[in-house]
Amino acid sequence: MEGSTYSIVMLVVMLVIFYFLLIRPENKRKKKAQEMRDSIKKGDTITTIGGIVGRVVQAGKDTLVIETSEDRVRMEITRWAVSTTGVQTTDQPTEEKSDKSDKKKKKEEPAAIEEKAAASDEAPVEEKKD
């Protein structure tokens, strides 16, 4: 009987650990996100989960109307589609590094093309005679 009691205690301990490491933080995150969505008001700048940035021009119970550009393009979205208030930026330096290396490659490409063109101009061209 002592072994089964130990097993039950270990199972309860595992469930408690699971609750504090996974369930509770997730519930806190959801509650914080819902509070953020409920506090959105006219004039706030938001970013949707799809990456659209806009300024709130009308706030309803379940929907928001946002203006997305200087041309006054308006879109109606649901509140649950709001990712963050403000403009969301990436904090991933790996993407920035890859972007910089891509830019370097693009800058080098025209130079490489010009060098190839110059080399082909200098090379003798043989013509076929029939």
Image (cartoon, rainbow, N blue to C red):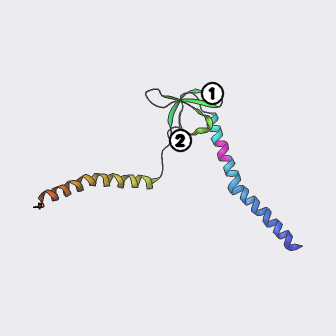
Q: Who is closer to the viewer here, 102 or 24?
A: 102
Q: Quadrant of the N terminus?
A: bottom right
Residue sitting at x 72%, y 60%: 17
Residue 85 vertical position relative to residue 102 in the rendered view, above or below: above
Q: Which residue is mark 2?
A: 50
93 or 47: nearer the eye? 47
Residue 78 lies in quadrant: top right
Task: Look at 63% across and 27% down and name the residue there.
Answer: 60
Mark 1: few/some/many CA within 10 Å (<14, 14-19, 20+): few
Q: Is residue 121 left or right of residue 36?
A: left
* Position of the C terminus by quadrant: bottom left
**Residue 106 location (% of width, % of height):** 31, 52
Residue drawn 66% across and 45% down? 30
Callout 1 amino acid:
Gly
> In the rendered view, does 81 fall on the left or right side of 53?
right
Element type at mark 2? loop
Q: Is residue 103 magenta?
A: no
Q: Earlier in the sequence, mark 1 or mark 2?
A: 2
Distance Cα–Cα, label 1 vs label 2: 20 Å
User: Percent from the top left, x then y, of residue 120?
Assistant: 16, 58
In the image, is 24 to the left or to the right of 81?
right
How packed is label 2: few (under 14 Cα within 10 Å), some, or many (20 or more)?
few
When the figure is inspected, residue 45 is found, relative to residue 112, above or below; the finding is above
How far across and down, in percent of the image, does residue 36 sit?
62, 38
Residue at 47% x, 52% y is 92
Does residue 116 sit above or below 80 in this rendering?
below
* Secondary structure beneath label 1: loop
> Which span of residues is magenta-colored?
28-32
| Amino acid type of the residue tagged 2 in the rendering | Gly
Residue that label 1 marks: 60
